[in-house]
Image (cartoon, rainbow, N blue to C red):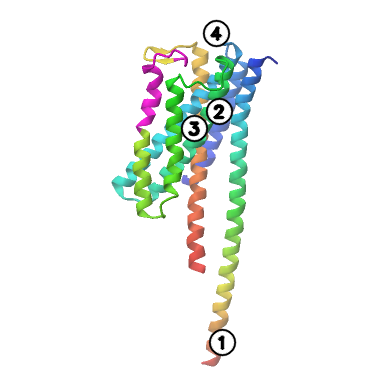
Amino acid sequence: MSSGDRYVFAAYTVVLVTVLVYLLIIALKVSRLDRELGELARRARERRAQEEQDEREQATVG
Amino acid sequence: MRNSRPALFALATLVLLGGGIALALFWVPDDADQGFSQRIFYIHVPIALTAYACFGWGAWKALRLLWLRDERYDLESYTAVHIGLIFGVLTLVTGSIWARTSWGVWWTWSSRQLVMFLVLFLFYAAYFMLRYSVEPGRRRANISAVYALFGVVLVPISFLAIRLSSDLIHPVVLKKSGPDMAGSMFLVFCICLAGMLSLAATMYNVELTGKRLDGHLRELREALA
């Protein structure tokens, strides 16, 4: 491989690696969003269960 | 239809950029002057033009924000500048590699085209410093929009610098009289340009969706706190 060929290879590799790094960053971001959304869904379920329990307790007292 | 847009752009990128790069490496003839190393042209110039397009798109969204007072354009303008900056880094890196193989140096301050592009890049890099030094809200959106609009003035200056300069270092292939290259070379260049624009559009849509999701999650977190 000549010197010119190596530079062409380097330029195309830089572009490819950048796209792959970008993909990796997006993948990490998506997994973080998934984790946070799961946490919020769990909190929402807990809150709903708490509200239902409070309603039942009020109905029993009334 | 709106949700399938990133997938369509991704598919177009795969076909156009994959095909374009394959043609650039294995099909087009060697340049008479530079030989095989001229093939960097097929990614370097489309990347630079895509960076200009992203900055232009960011300015257009900034103008819409200032004109229509719609907050969603702030995020769209910011995302376009963000993607433009990624392409800006790639322009500088691939350009530097090409300079090394063609001129024997990684960088030369005597070429106005290179210096103007660096100025443009640094101007948009400073956009992020400005944006994150102001509290989120209407004021930040307006300041960022005005800055993005000022920056886009540098795009035609950067593009024309090569034509106005007389340093003769940076080659000019896209002239008023038409492209100064063989038909097959110009065809591959156009395919690579379309591929790069598709890649930028894919990244823009994915990034924008991610940022919007982040915003919705923040709202949800506040509502459930």
Choose mark 3 or mark 1, whichever is in front: 3
Instruction: Please determine whether, in this image, residue B183 is positioned above or below residue A59.
Output: above
* Contact check, label 2 and label 4, Cβ < 8 Å: no
Task: Give the mark nearest the N terminus, 2 or 4.
Answer: 4
Disc 2 is placed on an element classified as helix
Chain containing the residue with disc 3: B
Check disc 1 and report the residue beneath it: A57
Check disc 3 and report the residue beneath it: B88
Disc 4 is placed on an element classified as loop
For mark 2, does the 10 Å Cα neighbourhood hold few (<14), some (14 to 19), or many (20 or more) residues? some
Check disc 2 and report the residue beneath it: B93
For mark 1, does the 10 Å Cα neighbourhood hold few (<14), some (14 to 19), or many (20 or more) residues? few
* Contact check, label 3 and label 4, Cβ < 8 Å: no
* Contact check, label 2 and label 1, Cβ < 8 Å: no
Choose mark 2 or mark 4, whichever is in front: 2
Q: Residue furthest left?
A: B67
Marks 2 and 1 sit apart, C-alpha to C-alpha, by 67 Å
Asked if residue B74 can be seen in this view, the reply is yes
Asked if residue B4 can be seen in this view, the reply is no
Marks 1 and 4 sit apart, C-alpha to C-alpha, by 87 Å
Amino acid at the residue labelled 4: Asp
Marks 2 and 4 sit apart, C-alpha to C-alpha, by 22 Å
Check disc 4 and report the residue beneath it: B33
Residue A18 horizontal/vertical position (percent): 59, 35
- Same chain? Circles 2 and 4: yes
Choose mark 2 or mark 1, whichever is in front: 2
Amino acid at the residue labelled 1: Glu
Chain containing the residue with disc 1: A
Using the image as rendered, state which of residue B27 and residue B127 is in the foreground.
Answer: B127
Magenta span of residues: B153-173
